[in-house]
Image (spheres, helix red, strand yellow):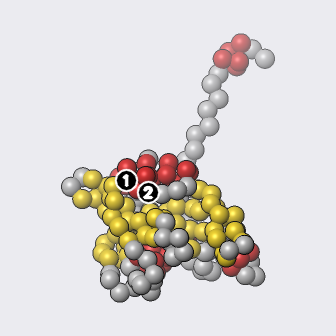
Amino acid sequence: MSDKKNEQNFEVELTLQSTKQLPISVQADHKSDVRTQFAALCYRVVKDQVQVLLVTSRGRQRWILPKGWPMDGKTPGECAAIEAWEEAGVVGKPSDRCLGIFSYAKIIDEDTNLPCIGMVYPVKVKSLKNDFPEAKQRRRKWVSLKKAAKLLSEPELIQIVKTFEPRQIHL
């Protein structure tokens, strides 16, 4: 091998998929067989400051992003937006660009934790409704990216939130 070839830098360039995300087909028999959830990073920009909407979990009342299971015939971004509506009353526009992936254990009951992967999709919030399916079970709060990083628990999710830049999202 020549010295010139040895001196070459081999770089891998990651590119975003340029085609539109197609709806998925759920192959599992039961929801518990699917261990991927789609999370909504609901955001708005106020006076050039990015804010994200956090909700509380139903059980331990921890601050989280709205998230839920895949839905047959829906894209991951659409699933995230549906969960944002159900859990936080969000009316908004989702993107099918995944911002990142985080891991966590979903508590099923006292004795059962389900290992999960959460895929995060941005949802630009147009408005919030006060009457939504889980309104009586959750609280919601607008916070800065920095504050959200302090309130969330999962290290990978914290990193996704800290580096979120809405100007890179094309809705």
At 63% from the left and 68% from the top, the residue drawn is 106
Count neighbours of disc 2 (C-alpha within 10 A) and say few if under 14, some if 14 to 19, many if 20 or more.
some
- Quarter of image, res 71: bottom right
Q: Amino acid at mark 2?
A: Leu
Q: Position of residue 49 (x, y in %)?
A: 27, 53
Q: CA distance from mark 1 to mark 2?
A: 6 Å
Q: In the image shown, does 88 or 94 lie closer to the viewer?
A: 88
**45 and 73: which one is in front?**
45
Residue 63 is situated, as x and y percent measured from the top left of the image, at: 46, 64
Label 1, residues with CA under 10 Å away: few <14, some 14-19, many ≥20: some
- Seen at 31% across and 72% down, the residue is 126
Q: For residue 11, which numbered disc appears in the image?
A: none
Question: In the rendered view, does 138 fall on the left or right side of 27?
Answer: left
Residue at 39% in and 74% down: 139
Using residue 120 as the reference point, say whether residue 171 is left or right of it.
Answer: left
Return the x and y of residue 92 as percentages of the image width and height: 37, 73
Q: Which residue reaches farthest top?
A: 3
Image quadrant assignment for residue 117: bottom right
Location of mark 2 (residue): 151
Image quarter where the N terminus lies is top right
In the image, residue 81 lies at what x, y percent? 46, 73
Is disc 1 in contact with disc 2, using a CB cutoff of under 8 Å? yes
- Numbered tag placed on residue 147 in the rendering: 1
- Residue 67 vertical placement versus 48 (above, below): below
Report whether residue 19 is seen. no
In the image, 137 versus 68, the foreground residue is 137
Q: Is any part of residue 112 visible from this angle?
A: yes
What is the quadrant of the C terminus in the image? bottom left
Residue at figure coordinates x 35%, y 87% from the top left = 131
Which type of secondary structure does the marked residue at label 1 adopt? Answer: helix
